[in-house]
Every structure is written in structure tokens, then in C-alpha cells.
Image (cartoon, rainbow, N blue to C red):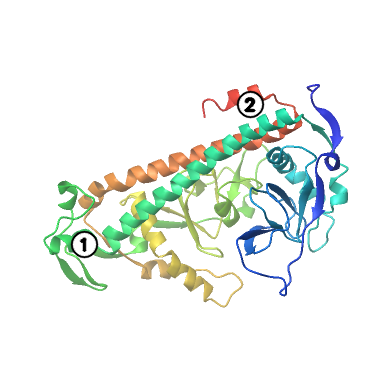
Amino acid sequence: MNSEWIATTVGEQATLQRGFDITKATQQSGSIPVISSGGTNSYHNTAMAKGPGVILGRKGVVGSVYFVEEDYWPHDTTLWVKDFHGNNERFTYYFFLSKAKDLAALDVGSANPTLNRNHVHPIKVQWPKVSTQKEIAAFLGALDDRITLLRETNTTLEAIAQALFKSWFVDFDPVRAKQEGREPEGMDADTAALFPDSFEESELGLVPKGWRVKSLDTIAEYLNGLALQKFPPDEDDWLPVIKIAQLRKGNTNGADRANRRLKSEYIIQNGDVLFSWSGSLEIVVWCGGEGALNQHLFKVTSKDYPKWFYYFWTKHHLASFQQTAASKATTMGHIQRKHLTEAKVIAPPFESIQAISGYFAPLLDRWITNSLKAQTLATLRDTLLPRLISGRLRLPDAEALVEDV
């Protein structure tokens, strides 16, 4: 251990205070974030603490850690750092983040998880001087910034692709432009030639001439997952089970395990399209690593149509599917296969789709590349975090590990 690190306790470096409750009488809307154990979910017109701040989940969600730059209202369900004792606020945040599992293990609640600050303050730790704190915080912050930028870029990429898909395949803007004698916007002459200049009647009304109405389940196969509790893992040969929870998180941290000896179609790879048809209905392009397909999830593939085509058509119908699931009088709403058949798509001739792929496939490929890079950086950050915070890893060594990422 570096001699510049000292043996101390959490309470000597960061004094925790219970947050403040909000009653109906005191609730006033404003721009001040109210941070509860589950994060920011409301705003107030009064700040009870100065930023930058560090907040821990105290009740309900134990082990959550948040950093806020601006003034804020720490809710009664949290503990907040009232006194940093001269320490770097961002380093203190990363310290508590590295201890998230330990904090969760301090739960003293019964039905409702609860964290007591008197159990946190005595924890013995190694603590660096402020200059070292700033260096570590800057390094970890730079990693987080890179991850955030990749994810923000992906949000933009998907918005562009989705808007383009809606314009071309739902609103038929290029066809309408040609029908009116105008050049379609945002495409060259070769691409414009792929779109007809008139409409014809169909079961859905007017559609571009030569295009066909199809059922969603005819352009792609929707493979339902397995009841994987029937496939217990071997000790040294297993796959993480991808359920709805993993779908929403985007990773397999803490996932159940299943036997690897499944049929190949039930093994999920990066880039696969997954659609949860029960509970929380969502569709994603999975980039969380290899895993096993659990029941209540569809793995969506197609032998005939490109990934972007069936992904965006499924996403186009997602709101309707969610409404159908919500209307069911069950504890866990869901859709049935008949709803996939009832959902219609408008499909151009295959040669047109293949040519149009030149617009959509690169956007999706870049999205996947960014997602995988963000996952790699997040995994690396999570690996380095506890070692840097405890002083077991020197900063130059950590910097060397991320040079090629």
C-alpha cells in the first residue's frame, strides 16, 4: 500500500445525514432535483443541500449511489454526504459506488430494505490524499464521459434511423414527392428510382404501387425462449440466462445460469434482436454478451429480410403491443402470436430493400459497434474502480489498460 494512503473510517472522511421528507403541504414544483433511493423522479422549488453532492439509497433501494452537480433535495429515503471533510466530492462518489454491494449487504430492514448510517460510518478503509483523489476521479470521470458520449451518439443514430424509416415506409414521403412531380428529399437519383411514383389500393388503404402488405410474423421468425430452470448449469460450462431484467439493464450482471448445451438457436449473441412479449414489452438489439434465451423473450431473425427492416417494423408496432398487454386482466400482461399475425407491414420488392439497406445497415452497424465499446469500457471501469479506490492499483497502470480501448 502506498504510504500516502492512510487507514481511517468512512465516517471520518464523509459524514452521512438522513434526507428530508416531503409532505403534500410542503411539495412545491420547481427545478431543484429531488433525489430518492431510486434516483431523481421529481423536482422542488427549494434546495436542502448544496451541490456537488453524493447520495446513497437508505430505504427501499439499498446500494444505489448518485452524484449531483447542482443544489438538490435529498429525500428521506436516502443518506447524503453532509460533510466531505475537505475530500474531493467526485472521488467520494466513486468510493461509495465501489462499495455498493457492501452497502446493500448492510440492509437492516425486513420487508423494506433499510440502510443505517451508524453501520456505514465505522467501516475501515484506506484513503488517499486529496491530490490523488482528484487524479483518480478525473480518470474514472473520463471513462464515464466516454461511455456517456457513446450512448448519446447511439440515441441520435437510432432517432435518425427511426425517422427515416417512418418517412420512407410508413408515411411514404418519397412516393408522395414523386407523385407530385418533386424530387424526393435526402436521397440520390438511384435511390429515388427504387420508389414508385403512384399508389394502389390494399387491405390497409393506399400503399406504394408494387409494395405488398404482409404480417409481421411473415417477415421474421419470433423464437420463444425456454424454461431454463429445466437446464441447470454444469459447474464449469454455463451461460448467463437473459430474462426481461437483463434485457432492460443491457447486461448479464447477477444473472441466473443455464447449461450451455442448448440448441444453437437458443443461444444469444451480440447483435441479436430480442423482444420481450410479456411483462415489460421492449425490443432491443442486444449487446450484453453471449447468453441463453429465457421464456417470455423472442429472438427475432429472418432468412429473407435485413435486420434493420424487421427491427424497425417490430418497434413500429411496439406501442400497440404494449397497449394490448396492458389491457389484459392478468398479473403479467402479454401478447400472443396472433397479435404478430394481425400486425401488418408494408414491404417493397426484395431488390429495393437490398438497395435501401445501404442507408440503414451502416447506422445499425455503427450503433452496435458503439454499444459494444460502451459495454467494454463499463466493464473495465467496474473492474478498475474498487482497485483504484482502495489503492491496490496505481493510476499509471490503470491508464495503460485503457489505452487501446
Relative image position of residue 213 (x, y in whole percent): 26, 66
Which of the two marks, 2 or 1, is nearer to us in this view?
2
Identify the residue at the far left of this view.
181
Q: Is residue 197 visible?
A: no
For the residue marked with disc 2, what is the amino acid? Ala
> Residue 133 sits in which quadrant?
top right
Dot 1 corresponds to which residue?
211
Badge 1: few (under 14), some or many (20 or more) residues near its Cα, within 10 Å? some
Height in image: 272 above or below 180? Answer: above
Height in image: 258 above or below 296? Answer: above
Residue at image coords 23%, 47%: 355
Instruction: Give residue 246's mark.
Output: none
Badge 2: few (under 14), some or many (20 or more) residues near its Cα, within 10 Å? some
Height in image: 20 above or below 144? Answer: below
Residue at image coords 66%, 29%: 135
Q: Is residue 134 visible?
A: yes
Dot 2 corresponds to which residue?
398
Q: Quadrant of the N terminus?
A: top right
Height in image: 121 above or below 225? Answer: above
Residue at image coords 32%, 60%: 166
Relative image position of residue 178 (x, y in whole percent): 14, 60
Q: Which sits earlier in the primary sequence, circle 2 or circle 1? A: 1
For the residue marked with disc 1, what is the amino acid? Trp
Is 40 on the left or on the right of 16, as rendered?
left
- Disc 2 from disc 1: Cα separation: 55 Å
